[in-house]
Image (cartoon, rainbow, N blue to C red):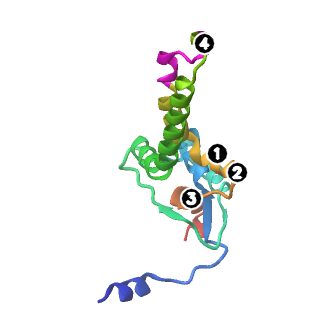
Amino acid sequence: ASPAESVRRLYSKLDEELLRGVALSECLRNCGQHWQRPLAESMHDIEKQSYGKSFKVARYHHFLSHDWETSGTKKVSSVLLLTNSLAACLATMFCSVLLGLVRDTRRPEGLRPQRHVSSFLPYAAYLFFLLFWQTLRTAARRPVVVFHDRLCIAQHDRALKQ
C-alpha cells in the first residue's frame, strides 16, 4: 500500500465535540505536572480538573502522546527543547550583542557593567526563554494548541473516553 493509502485508512470522522486541544503553555506549566504520575487516591479529581483545561478546536499544531514508561522530566525537557530553543537562542544572541555594545561604549569605568556579572546575563536569558517562552508567547499571541491525550481525553468519564 502507498503512503497516501495508509493515511486514508487512518483518517476517521470524529465528532466535533470530542476534538479538543490544550495550550502548550498549559502542558508545560509547573514543570510539566501533567506528565507526572499522580497519587492513586487523588487520580479521579486530578483527571477531571485536567480535562477541564482543554477546549474544542478545529485543529492543533502538535500531537503529544503520554505514556507511563518514560519519565516526565525527559518528556518536558524534550518538549522545551523542541519548542522553545529557537527563541532562547535568539534572546541569548540579542543579549550578547547588547552587552557587547554596552561594554564597548566610552563611559567612565564605574558606569560600565561588571564583566563577571554581565557575562552571566546571556546564560540567564537562555534559561529564562527556554523555560518560559510558551507562557510569554501566549500572553502576546494565540497559543500553540496541542493534543495531549491526558488532558484532552476525558479520563474520568468512561462514556466520553470511548
- Between residue 154 and residue 91, name the one nearer to us: 91
**Residue 36 seen in the figure:** no
Distance between the alpha carbons at the discs numbered 4 and 2: 38 Å
114 in the magenta segment: yes
| Disc 4 + disc 2, Cβ < 8 Å | no
Q: Which amino acid, by three-letter code, is at mark 2?
A: Ala
In the displayed structure, does residue 83 sit left or right of residue 110? left
Q: Which residue is mark 4?
A: 108
Q: Residue at x 58, y 65 (%)?
A: 158
| Disc 2 + disc 1, Cβ < 8 Å | yes
Q: Which residue is mark 3?
A: 155
- The image quarter containing residue 145 is bottom right
The location of residue 31, given as percent across then percent down, is 52, 39
| Residue placed furthest toward the left | 1
The location of residue 62, given as percent across then percent down, is 51, 63
Q: Estimate how packed mark 2 is, as few (under 14), some (14 to 19) or many (20 or more) residues with alpha carbons within 10 Å.
A: few
Label 3 element class: loop
Q: Earlier in the sequence, mark 4 or mark 2?
A: 4
Distance between the alpha carbons at the discs numbered 3 and 1: 29 Å
Which-is-in-front pick, marks 4 and 1? 4
Label 1 element class: helix
| Span colored in magenta | 110-120
Q: Estimate how packed mark 3 is, as few (under 14), some (14 to 19) or many (20 or more) residues with alpha carbons within 10 Å.
A: many
The location of residue 155, given as percent across then percent down, is 56, 59
Q: Which amino acid, by three-letter code, is at mark 4?
A: Pro
Q: Which residue is mark 2?
A: 140
Residue 124 to residue 49: above or below:
above
Q: Residue at x 43, y 87 (%)?
A: 8
